[in-house]
Amino acid sequence: MCIKIGSASELNISIKEVTSFYDCNWTRKIALSNENFYQWQFISTPNNNNDDCCVAIDENEIIAVMGLHERPFHLNQKEYSGAELTTWIVHKDKRNLGLGPKMIDYLQSKYDVLFGMGISKDALPVYLRKGFKYIKSIPRYIYPINYNSIETFGHYTPLAKKLSKIRGRHEIYTIIKHTENELNILNSVFSSNANFFNRSEQWINWRYEKHPSFNYIINVISNNKGNKCVVVYRIDHLKDLTIMHCLDIYGEYNAFSSGISYLEDTARNNNVDIIDFYSTNSKVNSAFIHKNWFPTLDFDFIDFPHLFHPIEMRTPSTTSLILWFNDDCNLSYDFGKLYITKQDCDFDRPVENNMNLVSH
């Protein structure tokens, strides 16, 4: 065996070779087997023309792939070299050869910060032995509106409907069209108190406005005192269910309650049945708790699926997270300051047969 590990670009591996590997070896249909989606996800990112996915080859044949794209990470008001990891797969005949630790060694030598979501039981021990930290369940908040649709797919008790009548106070807000300057300012303001992947205008433009499948709405919301935050959502129309996914809310904390009121009003105006939001950040989450959204990890009287193609209930109805920081980052692992949402680590990805790819 002559195993080499590096990025797809370093090893001269083509997009077609990697997407074909995903298509042949992943157990379900996957968007990463589509060359157009792969191009957007990994190569057409800001300031990048290389394929940085981590690949292991044996005699020029792919035997393992770790999906990856580079993204700056704001940590304690400094910027570090970061990478979002996704969809790690090893050929079934090449397992137990030590490929996992070697691939992680390569990544840890190249980046300061590494994150991944939805970690399998098989992969978790490898990450932990390499110094990664693990969050088993990312906090998730739901806002039920139409219980007739919700009971078809989830479950709730009479207490949930009673508590739904105790809504948080409706806050005044103004919708401001987002501009490059506004997005950059709010990204900078948020970085003074939170640790997160860069959300400046160029990254927001790539992640949302240039997404090849989904239609996202981005707005800057201002409260009556002039505090502002960025709010991003998309609405998913499924059979017998319309769900709004809030992907992002960041900026000035005092504006978050107004941003949430905007989401609630928009959902009702669009006949949405339920809204959901994922976040690791305790201060961001406090605004949703204050507005009486239901935390699915804490309340056992209501739950709702987080997988939708097909709709599938799992317990817990959220996902997991692994993270690693180079010791030079000098970080105490303050998960309360960490801001990871459904926006990050390829967690809001279509399945291959529901992509509806559009050109940009």
Image (cartoon, grey):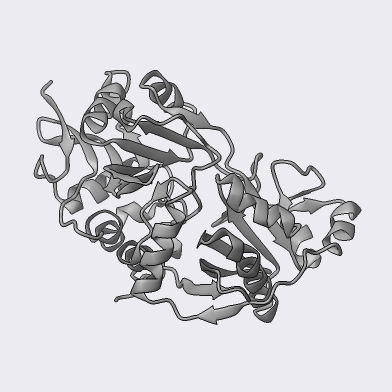
Residue at 35 percent of width and 62 percent of height: 200
Image location of residue 211, percent across then percent down = 36, 67
Q: Is residue 118 left or right of residue 179?
A: right
Image location of residue 279, percent across then percent down = 56, 49
**Which of the 4 image quarters holds residue 311?**
bottom right
Q: 77 and 37: which one is in front? A: 77
Residue at 56 percent of width and 33 percent of height: 136
- Image quadrant containing the N terminus: top left
User: Can the viewer see residue 75?
Assistant: yes
Q: Is residue 285 left or right of residue 299?
A: left
Residue at 9 percent of width and 30 percent of height: 59
Q: Is residue 99 above or below residue 299?
A: above
**Which of the 4 image quarters holds residue 257?**
bottom right
User: Can the viewer see residue 350?
Assistant: no
- Image quadrant containing the C terminus: bottom left
Image location of residue 291, percent across then percent down = 73, 60
